[in-house]
Amino acid sequence: MPTDAVPSAPSQAAPPPAKAPPPSAPRRWRQLSLLGGLLSVDNSESSVLSVLFPALRAALGLPLAALGQLVAASKLVTVIAGPVWVALARRWPRKNVLAVCCGFWGVWTASMGLAQNFVQLLVLATVAAAGFAGGGPLVNGLVADLFDDASRGRAAGVLYGIAALGLGVAGPVLGLLADVENGWRYGFFASGAVQVLFGVLILAFLYEPGVGATESGNVGKAAAPRLTRAQLRGLLRNRTLLLICVQRLTTGQFILISFGVTFLVDERGFSNATASLVTPAVTIAYLLGTFLGGFLADRVHRRRPRAGRIAAMQTAIVTYAVLACVATQIDWGPLWVYAVLFSLLGAVQSVNPGINRPIVMSVVVPELRSTAFALMLSAEAAGWALSSLLVGHLGDAFGLQTAFLWLTVVLMLANGALVTLLYRPYARDAAALQAELTRRAAPGRTEHA
């Protein structure tokens, strides 16, 4: 029995699991499209910050370190807020919680456009991020309940590909606002409005498959309204989950997302509007990478179920470090070269969701997966916050090129070495989960949350 599969006392408050559509039903792909769009608009306020920061910086008289502080505050609040939304989703339907935290919460994004100084912007950005923190863990939990283990790589790839497509479309549009007076304000207004719209769409069209709907025997064990101490201890004893959390805490892959456009403006001399033109190319590459990466990850997993996903993740991380060195440490001149190099970086980075999400799904029992994703994404957010602060201050002191060398090249090589520790725990934890699910599905057994 896996260490995180800890039974808790029965609770009448836990809703009965709904019957899931059969694996061949097209509804799950429509649901995935809706969830991908939701993730896209959830990240749109950070896209406004990253694309329009040079214009925003000029309007409010901010230093480069201010971008790091904005990103860090938004990610640090995720560490606390993410688990809170997951806890609420154990008491109320997930679609209702998603509609609030990832949809109607967009009013706070719109309010960022009214900020008159850095303190106001920082506070509003932090409040907005506190709501969107619920999206990642809840959406990934729903994906695990819509798709079985053999197809979760493809599902995660499509999910994050759709999310990237939305951001890619928004990127050049936001870049046009850089030349408009107070254009960054309009960017926040538009982002918030779209988020509220998606809240309505989630309430109207999202289908709730039921916890554990795609597991063997459709065990469908509902989550209890409260996470017990025993369950939490079980999760914290899961070595695969803990190592994934450490890996996400120490990754430097998010730096180019937050600072890429500013890097091209400050270090390579492009205008804000011109630098933002790399966004469509990066988005197309990221989109293709998520789709292709998800399919390849599933294929590798079928051939090498004990180690295929881990090897794929390690290869992607090391490749990213090498490409980051080439893209950021050499002055290539024309923008199209940076568009190509940044696109390759985006493609390599984009394979990760199709690998690490299925890894977590395959070692954690269904009723605890959203909680596990909350832990993983909290660690990821903390790492993003720390790296953003470091880049901001190192960039002010030594330049963004030097900051990128240490955090996107050296740190990522160390991160790739860290993944070596995952091979043995993953094989053991995945086998333990399958044994537990088989036990639950045995004839005559009944399970209570």
Image (cartoon, grey):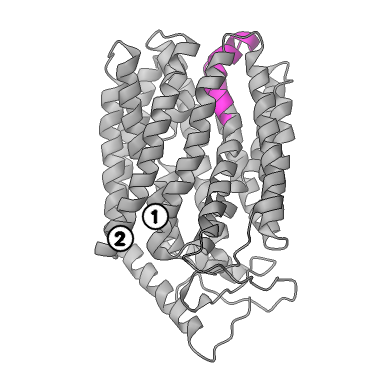
> Could you say whether the residue bearing mark 1 is in a helix, strand or loop?
helix
Residue named by callout 1: 153
- Quadrant for the C terminus in the image: bottom right
307 vs 184, left or right, is: left
Horizontal and vertical percent position of residue 256: 42, 28
Residues in magenta?
A: 46-68
Res 291 visible: yes
Horizontal and vertical percent position of residue 337: 29, 18
- Quadrant for the N terminus in the image: bottom left
For residue 257, the mark is: none
Count of numbered circles in the view: 2
The Cα–Cα distance between marks 1 and 2, rounded to whole angstroms, is: 9 Å
Q: Are marks 1 and 2 in contact (CB under 8 Å)?
A: yes
Quadrant of residue 9 within the rendered picture: bottom right
Horizontal and vertical percent position of residue 131: 67, 42
Q: Amino acid at mark 1?
A: Gly
Above or below, 268 relative to 65: above
Residue at image location 60% in from the left, 34% down from the top: 74
